[in-house]
Structure formats: C-alpha cells, structure tokens
C-alpha cells in the first residue's frame, strides 16, 4: 500500500455556473454542492446587503427576490437559482432613484440597528407587487414572518403603507 504522502490527490472538478443578479451575470464555481445562496452572495460576490440571520429560514434577514418572489437565501441552494433573476437590496433602487419601499423606510426612519432591513424591504417589495393597495391587515399578514430584534414593527407597517402610496403616486 502506498504511503499517504505519495498518493495523488484528485482535485475536485469545477465547472463555471452563472447567476443573474440585479440584471448582471456573475460566474461562480459549481462544485456540485448545495451551498446556500446567502453565502455565495455575501462571501463570493460581496453582496453584503443580504444578511445572514438565523440560518434556518425563520427570521427573514436573508430575503432576496428570485423571479420576483421573496425567498430565504439561507435555505436556497445556489444550484436551484441558476437561470433565475435574483434581486438583492443593492439592486432595488433604479440608479440614484430609490425604490418606493426604500424611500418610505427612510422617510419614516424605520431602521434601528438595520440588520433585518434589507429582508424587510425585499419582502415588502414582493408583497406590494402582488397587492398594490393593501389593507392594514394585509400588511401585518405579509410582514408577519420577518423578525426585527429592535421591535420596529409599527414603523415597518407604516413604511409599507407609505410605499404603497408612493407607488401609486409614481404611476399617476
């Protein structure tokens, strides 16, 4: 039996894989693994606006939009989003023009520590795409699964309602 030191180590084969993020294509190595999207976004591609929170898909801090759907990136294997449109908080604004959700969150000074805010804003964006004229109860139900350790829930709900108003104004 050969010595452990003399055995050849076969490197893992990697194949390029591309992700479409905020309208641009980014190559990443595809090792056939199921790394969570959040780690690829943050560690490999420097989209650090996407936060790692609980790692279990519960808190919502890692929320991104995948084909317009609010998606927990800590529970989403990177292989499952190839060919899909991924939108992070960095891609929410249109150049220098803030998205209505961003504008509302700033106007109402919602963030305290800010850790959950990108997930809150992307959840609100997806929600308002499907329900542009929400009731207060609709907003509570839509934002119910995103946690804020600072407890700014009242301001978050106000900001979502304000974002709906801003969207209407922008469309008029």
Image: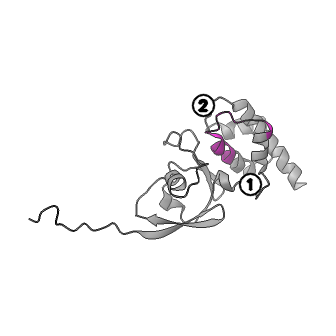
**Helix, strand or loop at mark 2:** loop
Q: Across the whole image, how many numbered discs are drawn on residues? A: 2
Query: With respect to residue 73, does 156 lie above or below?
Result: above
Query: Residue drawn 63% across and 54% down?
Result: 88
Task: Give the side of residue 1 with respect to residue 48, left or right.
Answer: left
User: Which is more toward the observer, 20 or 71?
Assistant: 20
The residue most toward the front is 5
Query: With respect to residue 78, does 53 lie above or below?
Result: above
Dot 2 crowding, Cα within 10 Å, few <14, some 14–19, many 20+: few
Task: Give the side of residue 26 with respect to residue 158, left or right.
Answer: left
Name the spot of residue 159 as percent of width and height, x first.
Answer: 77, 39
Residue range (magenta): 107-123
- Counting residues from the N terminus, which is met first, the one under dot 1 or under dot 2? 1
Name the spot of residue 139 as percent of width and height, x first.
Answer: 73, 38
Q: Is residue 40 magenta?
A: no
Name the spot of residue 114 as percent of width and height, x first.
Answer: 65, 38
Q: Which residue is mark 2?
A: 149
Q: Is residue 117 magenta?
A: yes
**Helix, strand or loop at mark 1:** loop
Q: Which residue is mark 1?
A: 93
User: Which is more toward the observer, 64 or 113?
Assistant: 113
User: Which is more toward the observer, 112 or 141?
Assistant: 112
């Amino acid at each position: 039996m050969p010595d452990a030191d003399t055995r050849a180590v076969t490197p893992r084969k990697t194949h390029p894989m591309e992700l479409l993020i905020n309208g641009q294509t980014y190559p990443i190595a595809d090792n056939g693994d199921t790394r969570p999207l959040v780690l690829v976004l943050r560690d490999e591609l420097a989209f650090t606006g996407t936060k790692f929170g609980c790692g279990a898909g519960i808190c919502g801090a890692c929320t991104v939009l995948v084909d317009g759907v609010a998606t927990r990136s800590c529970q989403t294997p990177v292989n499952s989003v190839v060919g899909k449109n991924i939108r992070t908080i960095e891609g929410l604004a249109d150049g220098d023009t803030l998205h209505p959700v961003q504008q509302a969150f700033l106007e109402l000074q919602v963030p305290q520590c800010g850790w959950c805010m990108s997930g809150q804003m992307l959840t609100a964006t997806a929600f308002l795409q499907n329900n542009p004229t929400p009731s207060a109860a609709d907003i509570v139900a839509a934002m119910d699964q995103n946690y804020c350790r600072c407890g700014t829930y009242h301001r978050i709900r106000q900001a979502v309602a304000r974002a709906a108003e801003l969207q209407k104004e922008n469309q008029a």
